Amino acid sequence: MTTVDEFLTEWYNDSSTLMVHTSGSTGKPKPLLVEKQRMEASARMTCQFLGLKAGDSALLCLPLDYIAGKMMMVRALTWQLRLVSVKADGHPLATIREHIDFAAMVPLQVWNSLQVPAERERLMDIHQLIIGGGAIDESLESQLRTFPHAVWSTYGMTETLSHIALRRLSGEEASSWYTPFEGVHLSLDDEGCLTIDAPHVCPCPLVTNDIAELQANGSFRILGRRDNVVCSGGIKIQIEEVERLLLPHLRNPFCISRRKDARLGEALVLLTEAADTMPIEDVCEQVLPRYWHPRYYVCVDHIPMTATGKISRKEAEGLAVASSPH
């Protein structure tokens, strides 16, 4: 795992570029060579949007092996923030005793912090909290809505050097729509996928796999990934939409995947860490539209995840195909 000193050595060497790796949520992580000046531009966009100022404390609690951790370092260096570094684990606030102005976390870190009263207080004391790297379910979002300071969901990817838009989760400004940073231009391609034109951070327009809805003022919301659309019996089903409907009702970790089906072409498969699928089947019958019901239910030891805390869709599909359905 990359240390702060190792990152600083690489940052201040003679090279104008830095090696980063994609998260691997839809396949094998890929190396990506990015320009340091574009990373600095991304850092300035975030800090300006959030109104951060020199001397503000910034918490580094994400691995420096990935873009999210690297960008916290770059923001601190570029904006002259005071870096507070802790171990990148599930309870980043366990040992914190000082006020934090700005922090970036993944949903699991936020959820864990909410379970411990002292850590919850420290979480609520953060002035600007950005959350990325995975889906924020309705239960978590509802807890954050009452937070006294600004909490944001991020939108972006390694190729855009972290996020290019934020969505407010807390207070009266809470919204399901993302606001892009200044200088970021968005459009939809013929398949409804979001196209990002952000020359300061990405050398050429990037067509994403995210199916989106775009408003005239530039704000947008994500419906799901194009590669997560299942065509079952002629009906197109967005995997993320099914998961969103089930999240409030299922206690055990789960995910939706797919497998080939002779009659339907493709069929939905629900993977669950629960030992008994009958209660889950009952929930699906009650809360999902008829044509969205999983055809197969598979019990697994663990839902496959990437190193950054996202569902590994490729591994999940492998389990869906290989496992005997229950």
Image (cartoon, helix red, strand yellow):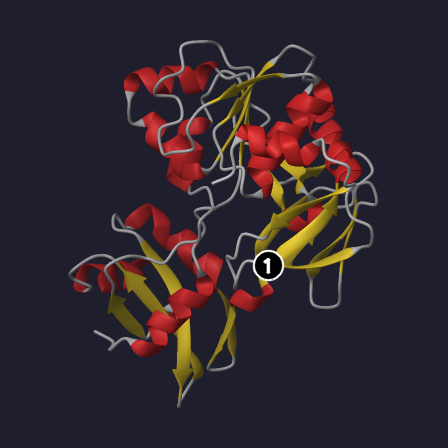
Image x and y of residue 60, in percent = 52, 26
Residue to which mark 1 is pinned: 30
- Image quadrant where residue 256 sits: bottom left
Q: How many marks?
A: 1
The answer to which quarter of the image holds residue 255 is bottom left
Location of residue 184 with respect to 266 vertically, above or below: above
Q: Residue at x 29, y 18 (%)?
A: 117
Q: What residue type is disc 1 on?
A: Lys
Q: Secondary structure at mark 1?
A: loop
Who is closer to the viewer here, 75 or 209?
75
Q: Is any atom of residue 181 visible in this view?
A: no
Residue 193 rendering spot, x and y as whole percentages: 68, 60
Identified at 52% across, 38% down, the residue is 2
Residue 14 placement, left or right of 192: right
Q: Residue furthest bottom?
A: 262
Q: Is residue 198 visible?
A: yes
Q: Give me the residue at 33% from left, 66% from top.
A: 270
Tell whether 13 sits left or right of 90: right
277 lies left or right of 185: left
Observer-nearest of 284 and 113: 113
Q: Residues within 10 Å of mark 1 (few under 14, many from 20)?
A: few
Residue 315 position within the rendered picture, expressed as x and y whole percent measured from the top left:
40, 66
Quadrant of the drawing holding the C terminus:
bottom left
Residue that appears at 75% across and 68% down: 190
In the rendered image, residue 172, in percent from the top left (x then y), is placed at 56, 23
Nearer to us in this view, 19 or 237: 19
Comparing 135 with 204, the one in front is 204
User: Height in image: 240 above or below 85?
Assistant: below
